[in-house]
Structures are given as C-alpha cells and as structure tokens.
Image (cartoon, rainbow, N blue to C red):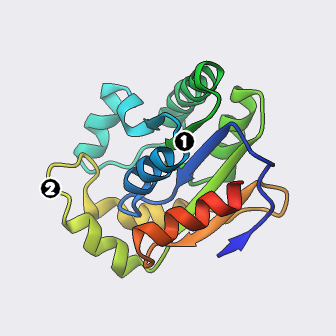
Amino acid sequence: MTSSTPAASPRLIVVMGVSGAGKSTIGEALAERMGVPFIDADNLHPRANVEKMRGGTPLVDADRWPWLEIVADAMRNTADTNGRVVCACSALKRAYRDCLTTRAGEPVAYVLLHGDKSVIAARQANRPGHFMPAALLDSQFATLEPFAPDEHGIVLDVALPIEEIVAGAEKALS
C-alpha cells in the first residue's frame, strides 16, 4: 500500500480504478463496514454513455464531465444527509478527480484499487452482462494517472483478499 495522506476522516470517499478492479465490490464492503451509504457511479451514467461503452467505444472527456458533476453532487448530497459516503467511480485521470473534488466543494479521499492487468482481465471476463467490455481494458490502463503528491489518495493491491483491502482502506481513512 502506498499513500499520500488522505484527509482526516473525509466525508467523501471514492473507491477508484480501471474497470474490473473491484470498485463496486470493495466500495460496497467498505461502506457497510463504516456504516455509511454506498453510491455506484456506474448507475449515474447517462444512457448515451452506457450505450457507447456497451458498443465498445471508449468515452471521451466530453462524455465524462457531465457524469462526474452528477457523481460529485450525489456524493455531497448523500454526505449532507448521512454524514459520510463511499462511492465507486473510475476517476482515472487527475483532471477527473479534480472535477469531483471541485464540484463537491470539499476534500475527497481516493482509494485506488490497482494491480496486474492479467488479474483484472480475468475478473472482467467473469462479469457477464456488464456494459463495459473487456476490449476497453487497455484504454482504461492507458488513461489511468497515478496520484500526484498533493492528492488525498491511497493505493491498494487488487490481488489481496477483499477483507484485507477493506481493512487497509478503513485504517488509512480513519
């Protein structure tokens, strides 16, 4: 695990990474462990984005900006009502993370689920019916930008058991 000092007890937590890294699984488990609501940003994509990805076409930034604003608003509103929130969202580029943080109007802690492409590809292959085809995995890895020193983020290895990843995230965030 590597870390760049997440904000102390942040209200907004984003579990991020490429498609198939386990964002939804880890995000939901972390939210349950912390006793807070969980948001899956995939559920907030406009229909056009979903159809584009389902057709094997990677999204471009113009597709992502409105979606990221929706995600940031949903996180802030949920945290305003419930105290904290965990959200699964790819947030692959620094600019996307900056958009989420700026739109939310407060610090966001990021938990990057990172690992070997072959491990993630195997997981993706076992997700029948998901709108994100495995063919887009290379574009996801090409887009992923590591944390800059001034970002509030931790990196956890996807090869670890789910419980260890969740425990590591919770410890880093507390």
Q: In the structure shown, which secondary structural element does the residue marked by tag 2 occupy?
A: loop
Q: Earlier in the sequence, mark 1 or mark 2?
A: 1
Q: Tell me the crowding category of disc 1: few under 14, some 14 to 19, or many 20 or more residues within 10 angstroms, Cα based.
A: many
Indicate the amino acid at tag 2.
Pro
Q: Quadrant of the N terminus?
A: bottom right
Give the side of residue 162 with respect to residue 155, left or right: left
Q: Work out whether 120 lies above or below 8.
A: below
Relative to residue 93, is residue 135 drawn left or right?
A: left
Asked whether residue 69 appears in the rendered view, the answer is yes
Q: Is residue 129 left or right of residue 94?
A: left
Occupied quadrant, residue 4: bottom right
Label number found at residue 132: none
* Viewer can see residue 142: no
Is residue 171 placed above or below 79 in the rendered structure? below
Residue found 57% across the figure and 70% down from its top: 156
Above/below status of 97 relative to 165: above
Q: Nearer the viewer, residue 74 or 141?
A: 74
Report which residue position mark 2 lands on. Answer: 128
Determine the residue located farthest toward the right in the rendered image: 150
Q: Quadrant of the C terminus?
A: bottom right
> How many numbered marks have been drawn onto this rendered protein structure?
2
Specify the amino acid type for callout 1: Val
- Which residue corresponds to mark 1? 86
Residue shown at the point (45%, 45%) measured from the top left: 32
Q: Nearer the viewer, residue 167 or 79?
A: 167
- Residue 53 horizontal/vertical position (percent): 30, 44
Q: Residue at x 32, y 28 (%)?
A: 48
Q: Residues within 10 Å of mark 2 (few under 14, many from 20)?
A: few
